[in-house]
Amino acid sequence: MANQIPEEVIEEVRKSNDIVDVIGEYVQLKKQGRNFFGLCPFHGEKTPSFSVSQEKQIFHCFGCGKGGNAITFLMEMESYSFIETIKYLANRSGINLPDIGSERESPLSKENQNILSAYEWLTKLYHHLIRFTKEGKEGLHYLKDRGISEQAIDDFQLGFAPNSKIFTAEFLKQKGFNQALLVQSGLLSLQNDNSVTDRFRGRIIFPIRNHLGKTIAFGGRLISEGEPKYLNSAESELFQKGKVLYNFDLAKKHIRRENEVILFEGYMDVISAYQAGINNVIATLGTALTDYQAKLLNRYVDTVVICYDGDRAGLEATYKAANLLRKVGCQVKISNLRENLDPDSFIKAYGGKAFKKEIIDTSDTYISFYMRYRKKDFNLSLEGDRIQYIEDVIKEISLINSSVEREYYLKDLHKEYNISMESLNEEVEAQRNKQGYYHKKDNTDKNRNTNRAASYRSNHNLLPAYQNAERKLLSYMIQDSFIADKVQEEIGAGFNIDAHKILATHLYAFYEEGHSSDVSLFIEKLEDHDLKKLVTEIAMLPFSDEISDKEINDYIRMIQAQKNDYVNIQSLKEQQRVAEQQKDPIKAAQIAMQIIELKKQIKGTT
């Protein structure tokens, strides 16, 4: 498939898409030294071990070992084919691709592609109806009465499904869609008499899009009497409520810029905030926050502001969501809506600026929220309940690593309940001792972006010296064609490790084709998955800008010495075998000692 697009066009597409920008749409990256670090999107982790090199245009995870360039990242992340990836990147950077025909590889089944196409058609149809036709006026009046602007209606592609049983079914039939498939997908409902009706008729339509902006489901809000008031598409392979966040596609660029996301419970909260200029806003889809969604947010941001309704149900949902987010490593803040208003109602009553200034910017820390949340379970006018409440809060405070932060909250308890700071500190210390804080040296927060990488390098330093020399030499060869030429003259593919021999052979061929040093392009030319991983792993080794001839020669000498030592050991083993056959145990033992000594010398250079 790759040869359908000229090599020079693929190269232009690759060079027009900076890997940090591409991966930054999926992972929150922070610069640490020469590279960027973040949480790996391919395996669960709390400490960043995923490294991206802007200089080399490659990524590598020191945890799971995955690596490659921007193209391989998208192929892995989105299950795209090579052609789909090039199309996506070309579109992203405004490059026009030559006509490569209609043939298209896709990770989606033909049925799912048809369902996506049906959703796309209906999104356009329902939106057109609400904006420009008399059939949609009822829905348009409803939205305007709710304070939703025409701009917001367009931004969110809101629509209206006419209250007609056959309107949608007839429309999709004319477009050539299979009716049984539409029933299976939940767009149409099958009646007892085997007739079909529109599942969402008479409802405001909220398109639910995936992170790429493709509509994968609808949320429908009934505007007349009846039940249920809200209705989502049925769950399917394309749409799983626990894995989707409403408005994530529009919000993610704002989330990255703010390094903070505001989490709501409903569509209207999101739309009201967005049209008021608060754009880093998302919502769950009528369900509690899931572990999958929490981990997704943790890849993008440090801080999540939970802004649920201020009633008791909202408090309970906030507590559960906060703990889930903290568990995956997010910093959590909790808004405190007054007068039991929901976010949409507050914005309608007081405006977006007041909402940002009075609600979002003054959000509680988790501990402040916890103290407020737990009070509802105790009658604090009773001495026993007060003591139980204080002990409960102290247990939570004792989990905080920062001594300054612990003291801050203990002072609140000291002032409110007139308990000495000495007693409070003693209780915290007792709790921390019970929890084992003083039995483990916990430095995980120190240099957390580089711990995994440093550990990884440390493990590789334990390799035999000749193996480290080969890896180091290959890393310089990948970065510099002149060094590769020198090594080719000196030892050719004469490395000791088979994988290194193969890598060197491919690298020599790459340079002989006239390419300059470009690790991202080199990876693109390789077909073997394991070899690609090895290249990114080696290319991520620390690299000195000024490498001396002496250092290169030392690596070459070490590699050659290992080969000679191997030959010598094999020769000694043959001599030992002959001595044993000749019944000369003393000579055999002496040779054995020579072998041991030679192996020690080799090992001693690790």
Image (spheres, rainbow, N blue to C red):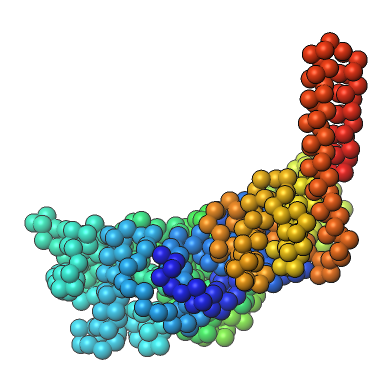
Residue 519's x, y, as percent? 65, 66
Q: Seen from this angle, which residue lies furthest top?
A: 583
Q: Which residue is drawn at 65% across and 61% down?
A: 508
Residue lying at the far left in this picture: please name it: 193
Quarter of the image that includes the C terminus: top right
Between 305 and 368, which is closer to the camera in this rendering?
305
The relative height of residue 136 versus residue 83 in the rendered view (above or below) is below
Residue at (84%, 45%) from the top-left corner? 561
> Horizontal placement of 158 versus 280: left or right?
left
Q: In this view, does 603 lie to the left or right of 445?
A: right
Q: Where is residue 332 in the image (x, y as percent from the top left)?
A: 63, 64
> Dividing the picture into quarters, in which one does residue 256 lie?
bottom right
Specify the quadrant that holds the N terminus: bottom left
Image: 528 above or below 580? below
Given residues 17 and 498, the one toward you in this image is 498
Residue 578 seen in render: yes
Left or right, 113 with reference to 558: left
| Residue drawn at x 29%, y 70% as measured from the top left | 117
The picture places residue 306, in percent across and down from the top left corner, at 56, 67
Query: Is residue 203 placed above or below 508 in the rendered structure?
Result: below
Name the residue at 84% across, 17% down: 579
Question: Looking at the image, can residue 409 be seen?
Answer: no
